Image (spheres, helix red, strand yellow):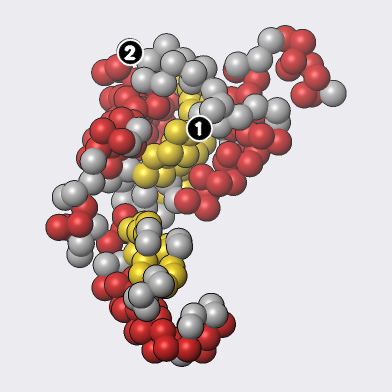
Amino acid sequence: MKIASVLEFETNNIEKAADQIKRLYSLFVSVDATQVEVNPFGETDTGKVVCFDAKITFDDNAAFRQSEIFKMNDETESDPREVEANKFNLNYIGLDGNIGCLVNGAGLAMATMDIIKLYGASPANFLDVGGSATAAQVKEAFKIISADSNVKAILVNIFGGIMKCDVIAQGIVDAVKEIGLNLPLIVRLSGTNMEKGNAILNESGLDISSATDLDDAALKAVEAIQTPKEKNKIKN
């Protein structure tokens, strides 16, 4: 009632508006929405309280509970790369830069993108393979990233917890061989089985640049796409 009053509905419509607001909240919870926007929300000259227009955004993580809603998604309106990523449970968002990023964990992905910007370049995407990615998912992630013509180098930044670095390393090697990757590839592995993972990369015979930490990885990725003059500018 207080919200309806603050919205300055006519006195006779306050109770109706309050009921609509409660129903909107129930809808928000029941469909796992991240946003329910009603604009405008008003009243007619005949005393009806009406939601004249509405927009609802749903939580992708709740797709398993809201299967009927997600079946209505029109994939033709989405970025085809995001659609392809969703098929393999990969979280992908395309950006405008030229360094492709493959990372596990949203926080690590954000940190990776930030440090790429710090060294003077821009990320081409946000791609989070999650905390338990398989070699097959890594392979698909490489296919999606390398399909972007703007990508001039790829940076892989993996922290192995539940996900083991050697599994990821094997996925990287398989992906590079299968798609015939001809872009500079920088890989930083840390955590569970990182020694085994680095050994797989080093013994693969592929042109993969290993990095010791995130700073080293980002710097190598940025240098890989820059001219000698630009590289000297970074070092100075």
Q: Is residue 131 above or below residue 87?
A: below
Q: Which residue is mark 1?
A: 95
| Residue at 61%, 29% in the rendered image | 122
Residue 128 quadrant: top left
Q: Is residue 66 left or right of residue 33?
A: left
Residue extending farthest front? 46
| Residue at 56%, 26% in the rendered image | 97
Nearer to us in this view, 210 or 145: 145
Disc 2 and disc 1 in contact, CB within 8 angstroms: no
Residue 87 in sight in this render: yes
Looking at the rendered structure, the kind of residue marked 1 is Leu
Q: Is residue 79 left or right of residue 63?
A: right
Residue 191 tag number: none
Q: Which type of secondary structure does the marked residue at label 1 adopt?
A: loop
| Residue 10, image x, y percentages | 48, 83
Q: Which residue is mark 2?
A: 180
Please identify the quadrant where the C terminus is shown.
top right
Q: Is residue 81 above or below residue 69?
A: above
Q: Is residue 91 above or below residue 198?
A: below
Nearer to us in this view, 153 or 126: 126
Q: What separation in Å lies between label 2 and label 1 (alpha carbons)?
A: 24 Å
Residue extending farthest right? 236
| Residue 209, image x, y percentages | 52, 23
Q: Is residue 112 left or right of residue 200?
A: right
| Residue 185, image x, y percentages | 48, 22
Looking at the rendered structure, the kind of residue marked 2 is Gly
| Residue at 31%, 30% in the rendered image | 80
Disc with the residue nearer the chain's start (2 vs 1): 1
Please give the count of numbered marks on the rendered protein.
Answer: 2
